Each structure stands twice: as C-alpha cells, then as structure tokens.
Image (tube, rainbow, N blue to C red):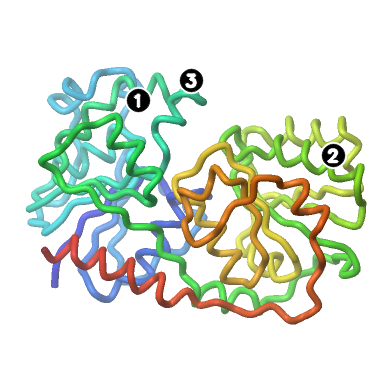
C-alpha cells in the first residue's frame, strides 16, 4: 500500500479544508495516509483510519522571510518514514510547504486552490505573503490545480516547463450530502416565493456585497424572494450593515456557519455565487448535487466548467420561474470517477 504524507494548515471551516476532508473520505482505504495539521481545532470529522499528526505551528515571523532562507532554517518535526508522495495541500503557507519538502518522499506535489493572478491584484495581504513564499513552488515535482482557470493563472506567473501540471478538481462527497439532506431543518421558508441561497466565507473574494447590491436592484422588479447566506468570516458585520443600509432586512437572512448546510439547501430553489474570483467553487457542485438551479456570473465559468454562467444576473432572477417538480439528487458519479482516476495516476505513476 502506497504511503502518503499530506500537510494542511488547519481543519477549520473553509473550502480547502472541506476539499481535503472529501478527498480523504474517498481514498482513505486505498492508501496509508499521514495527515499533518498545524492546528488541533477541527470543524470536520476525519476518517478513523487516517493517522492525524498535530504539529506546532512555527512562528508567524517566518511569513516575512524569503522562502530560500526559510528552507535553510525552518524545522518541521515529521515522522521518519519513507513516503511515496508528499503533498502540500494548502499552498498558502510556508510551513505546509516545508513539511512536504522536509519529509522523505519520492515525489512532492503542491495543490493550487485559487486564481493567483487575480488574488494578487485584489488582496494586499496575499500580495505581501506571496512576495516571500513564491520561491517555494520551484522545489515541487508536480503542480495540481483545481480548475483550468487557476492553472493558467499559475502558469502565467511560473514558467516550469520541465514540471508536470495537471488539473484535478475537488472531489464532491455526494454520499455525505445524500445522508445529510435527510436531516430535519427547523428553518421555515415560504415555499410560495423564490428561496435563494449562497454558501461561503464572508470575505472580499466571495463578493457578498455584490450580491446584496444586486438583490437591491432586483427589488425594483419583483419582491417574491428571500436570500439566505450560509457562512461566516471577517466581513460579516460589514455585510450585515450593508444589508441594513439597503433596507434588505425582510429579504435577507444570515445563517452563519452550519455543520450541515445541505439540510438548508434542500429547501431552496436557486444557488447563487457572486465571487470576484475562485479556485473552483466547490459549493456550486454541492448545490448541483442537491438539485438546485445554479446562477453564476460568466467570469466564474472557467473555474467550474460543468456550469454555464450568465451575463445578466438581474435579468436571470427577473425571469426566473419557481419549479414545482421535486428536486432530483445528482451523485456526480462520472465527475468524481474522473477525478479519482487522475489522483490515482499522480500517486502511482
């Protein structure tokens, strides 16, 4: 059985965290896996046969030291094991990269979860961090990106012609979704109106402010709808303030983080994502699995090819007609099988 070391920052609420949990749920019986985590506060449940190793997080001062120097001075206490493959699944941190580069492994892989070029333009904090850690990429053998859009962005910044680059979208654990949508939800919705939902971290990237402004414009044409926002983050208070400023109190509900968002999704009609940019937009596929209609702007198409974007979000909602047929669950079997084949190829080649 192949031995794999995977390094992640934490297992708190987030897309990267959900992605690794989904992956582990699918491949945990096929490989011997050590999961190295730099924070013992977990939002998600990890399969019992995964060996979770909690490491002390190095000083934050390392974030502001060029990676070439960090590589010489940072020490990560990994197991004395010969791994077939070591994976930095986080790609944002110095120490997850150092973990994957420190352990004994035949090959080293790093996952790319976002459109780095746009992220550099949009986020000052990321721009600073990237300046110091950008040299880490050269030390890896394989680059896995969650979408074509994210991979092209990475390749535009890094000219690694002699290295393997592959697109491996995120696994969607549809078995978990199928089970969790059966749970009862105490949320009461008005089934006579259009119930719209979004799920994500409440931060600049996710564009919830764009969504709220669009909802305000939509109100000029129709008012038979309600928007539910599932998630939390640094911009929550600001967004709640914007909602109040736009007088959207009776049309918008903030539900916060939810262990089981799917029991809420099953009560909805439309999933709406308004991100400024994405890596893949995993929640789109989760909503698709539940059976919701999906609306995303055109610029997000390249991050989630199965879903077509629209050039006019307001027009979409103005013309939207609520469906009366029961939702059809989609197990995304073909989608997941294609991803698993790619992952197996990376591990076993």
Spatial distance from mark 3 to mark 2, Cα to Cα? 29 Å
342 up-or-down from 39: above or below: below
* SS assignment at label 2: helix
**Residue at left offset 28%, top offset 50%:** 144
Is residue 41 visible to us here? no
Which image quarter holds the C terminus? bottom left
Residue named by callout 3: 124
29 up-or-down from 294: above or below: below
* SS assignment at label 1: helix
Residue named by callout 1: 130
* Lateral position of residue 150 relative to residue 30, left or right: right
Residue named by callout 2: 216
Q: Nearer the viewer, residue 307 or 75?
A: 307
Which of discs 1 and 2 lies nearer the camera? The answer is 2
Relative image position of residue 165 (x, y in whole percent):
22, 48
Mark 1 burial class by Cα count in 10 Å: few <14, some 14-19, many 20+: many
Relative image position of residue 146 (x, y in whole percent):
37, 51
* SS assignment at label 3: helix
Give the quarter of the image for residue 347. Answer: bottom left
Tell me whether the residue at label 3 lies in contact with that at label 2, contact meaning CB atoms closer than 8 angstroms. Answer: no
Please give the label number shown on residue 73: none
258 up-or-down from 115: above or below: below
Earlier in the chain: of badge 3 and badge 1, it is: 3
Mark 2 burial class by Cα count in 10 Å: few <14, some 14-19, many 20+: some
**Residue at left offset 47%, top offset 74%:** 332
Spatial distance from mark 1 to mark 2, Cα to Cα? 36 Å
**Residue at left offset 24%, top offset 46%:** 143
Earlier in the chain: of badge 3 and badge 2, it is: 3
Is residue 186 visible to us here? yes
Earlier in the chain: of badge 1 and badge 2, it is: 1
């Amino acid at each position: 059985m192949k031995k794999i070391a995977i390094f992640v920052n934490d297992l708190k609420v987030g897309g990267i965290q959900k992605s690794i949990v989904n992956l582990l749920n699918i491949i945990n019986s096929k490989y011997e896996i050590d999961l190295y985590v730099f924070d013992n506060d977990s939002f998600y449940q990890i399969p019992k046969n995964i060996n979770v190793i909690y490491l002390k997080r190095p000083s934050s001062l390392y974030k502001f030291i060029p990676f070439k120097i960090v590589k010489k001075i940072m020490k990560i206490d990994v197991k004395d094991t010969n791994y077939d493959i070591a994976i930095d699944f986080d790609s944002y941190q110095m120490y997850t990269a150092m973990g994957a580069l420190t352990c004994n492994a035949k090959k080293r892989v790093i996952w790319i979860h976002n459109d780095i070029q746009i992220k550099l333009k949009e986020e000052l904090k990321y721009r600073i961090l990237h300046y110091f850690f950008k040299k880490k990429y050269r030390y890896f053998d394989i680059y896995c990106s969650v979408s074509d859009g994210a991979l092209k962005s990475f390749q535009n910044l890094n000219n690694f012609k002699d290295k393997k680059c592959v697109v491996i979208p995120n696994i969607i654990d549809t078995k978990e979704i199928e089970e969790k949508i059966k749970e009862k939800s105490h949320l009461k919705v008005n089934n006579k109106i259009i119930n719209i939902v979004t799920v994500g971290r409440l931060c600049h990237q996710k564009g919830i402010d764009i969504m709220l402004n669009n909802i305000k414009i939509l109100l000029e044409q129709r008012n038979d709808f309600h928007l539910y926002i599932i998630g939390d983050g640094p911009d929550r208070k600001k967004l709640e303030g914007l909602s109040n400023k736009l007088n959207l109190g009776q049309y918008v509900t903030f539900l916060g983080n939810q262990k089981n968002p799917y029991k809420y999704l099953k009560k909805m009609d439309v999933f709406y994502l308004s991100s400024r940019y994405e890596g893949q937009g995993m929640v789109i596929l989760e909503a698709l699995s539940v059976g919701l209609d999906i609306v995303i702007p055109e610029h997000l198409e390249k991050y989630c090819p199965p879903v077509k974007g629209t050039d006019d979000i307001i027009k979409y909602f103005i013309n939207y007609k609520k469906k009366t047929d029961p939702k059809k669950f989609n197990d995304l079997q073909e989608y997941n099988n294609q991803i698993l084949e790619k992952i197996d190829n990376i591990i076993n080649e």
